[in-house]
Image (cartoon, rainbow, N blue to C red):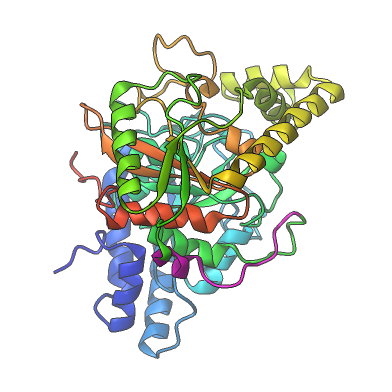
Amino acid sequence: MTDLTEPTAVRLAEGYRKGEFSPVEATRAALEEAERIQPRVNAFVRLLAEEALAQARAAEDRLRRGEPRGTLDGVPVTVKDMLLLRGRPTLRGSRTVAEDGPWTEDAPSVARLREQGAVFIGKTTTPEFGWKGVTDSPLTGVTRNPRDPSRTAGGSSGGSAAAVALGAAPLSLGTDGGGSVRIPASFCGIFGLKPTYGRVPVYPASPFGTLSHVGPMARDAADAALLLDVIAAPDARDWSALAPVTGSWADALAEGVHGLRVAFSPSLGGQVAVRPAVATAVRHAVEQLAGLGAYVEETDPDVTDPVDAFHTLWFSGAARLTHGLGRQQRELLDPGLREICARGARYSALDYLAAVDVRMDLGRRMGRFHETYDLLLTPTLPITAFEAGAEVPRASGHRRWTGWTPFTYPFNLTQQPAATVPVGTDADGLPVGLQIVAARHRDDLVLRAAHALYEAGVASSALTPAGS
């Protein structure tokens, strides 16, 4: 009998249509796996067993009648606890958020999933207000890596990444303001996509403004495309949402990479020190992409590290987020978050606008770069997962999480689509990610290239063994 935590979302949905699998049994399997992994990795804020099983039974009835709500009817999903889920608290990893609500709305992406009949297994962990690139918070503690629980899962969507990697639902909704989908997806060995800004509507608006995106986290690119087809639908509550696209992201996957012009930048022109094991795995994957028919050139985009501008925007957003908290509430915050809020409160409007100028110039440079190249490939991160419970690797010399994520946050500034694909492991068995970036609005190219790597066996959608 098939272990129903193993099939991808695409395979699960196909099995439902053919009567091979049951949504109720798939949901039970996901819930059991979630309960089994929780003591080891701490991926969940809360599980929703009763509601999930009721949703699964309703989906099973619809499928039996031949009246599915959509492509994800009966498919288990998890939701990062930064996104509203009607009827349940969204605490955002903070002891300063009151549980009593009222919690009467779904976030746009959650609403689209509910309309399709998806089954909500639970809410996944986040650092406080998603402020950093690892997942630990004063509210829920430390979330750990599925490959090695002594290591971090990354963040800020670390709970979602760990849940997908271990089979507690094949799909999850994450958020990404500086790498928060791609960082944990890379550390945990799954696929993560930050779509073009506005492609997936957001409500409430992020305090970090137009840096923050909602994106799919999944076992592979085909699953992510299936999820994006659902959540990239309009929502009137987001004034900055893009118009809907014609066609299907999933249908575009088969076009492959033949003839695409690809730039490979192994270190952003020597600006980033990349660990040898990471560099080797990434270069091998790039060579395989060339073997699939892409025209690959090793070259660098014309950019310098925009970290100071990113900090101005990010820290200002954090300061605005916590502006209304009293002294006692501030004492409840993560100390690192308190520190960046204090720094953000000292910036002037002119400082902020100067950072916007840097952002606009970076966007211009990348726009010109993509006139020549369809895709840019880099390592997702220069390192693999480090010790859990720390913002930066021990003895790294970094002060903040942005010190070890130089490949991710620039593309939040530019709002470009960017994904991470697992392309190998280091000597400790820790996953390595390849980042694929395209021009704004060309999410299809990112998904096509990622899918080609999965189809060629360069990337893996295998689950992390539950006992590892």
The stretch of residues the image draws in magenta is 240-254
Compare residues 265 and 170 and report the one nearer the observer.
265
Q: Is residue 362 left or right of residue 63?
A: right
Q: Position of residue 261 (x, y in %)?
A: 48, 48
Quadrant where the image shows the C terminus: top left
Q: Position of residue 215 (x, y in %)?
A: 53, 51
Q: Is residue 251 left or right of residue 130?
A: left
Compare residues 411 and 256 and report the one nearer the observer.
256
Q: Position of residue 225 (x, y in %)?
A: 46, 61
Residue furthest bottom as drawn:
65
Q: Is 80 rendered above or below residue 401? A: below
Number of numbered discs overlaid on the protein picture? 0
Q: Is residue 152 visible?
A: yes
Taking the spot 64% from the left edge, 49% from the top edge, the residue there is 197
Q: Is 205 rendered above or below residue 10? A: above
Taking the spot 24% from the left edge, 59% from the top edge, the residue there is 6
Q: Decide whether residue 97 is among the magenta residues.
A: no
Taking the spot 59% from the left edge, 62% from the top edge, the residue there is 232
Q: Quadrant of residue 67?
A: bottom left
Taking the spot 27% from the left edge, 63% from the top edge, the residue there is 7
Q: Decide whether residue 247 is among the magenta residues.
A: yes
Q: Position of residue 291 (x, y in %)?
A: 30, 49
Prevalent SS, magenta region: loop
Quadrant where the image shows the N terminus: bottom left
Q: Is 36 rendered above or below residue 139? A: below
Q: Is residue 321 visible?
A: no
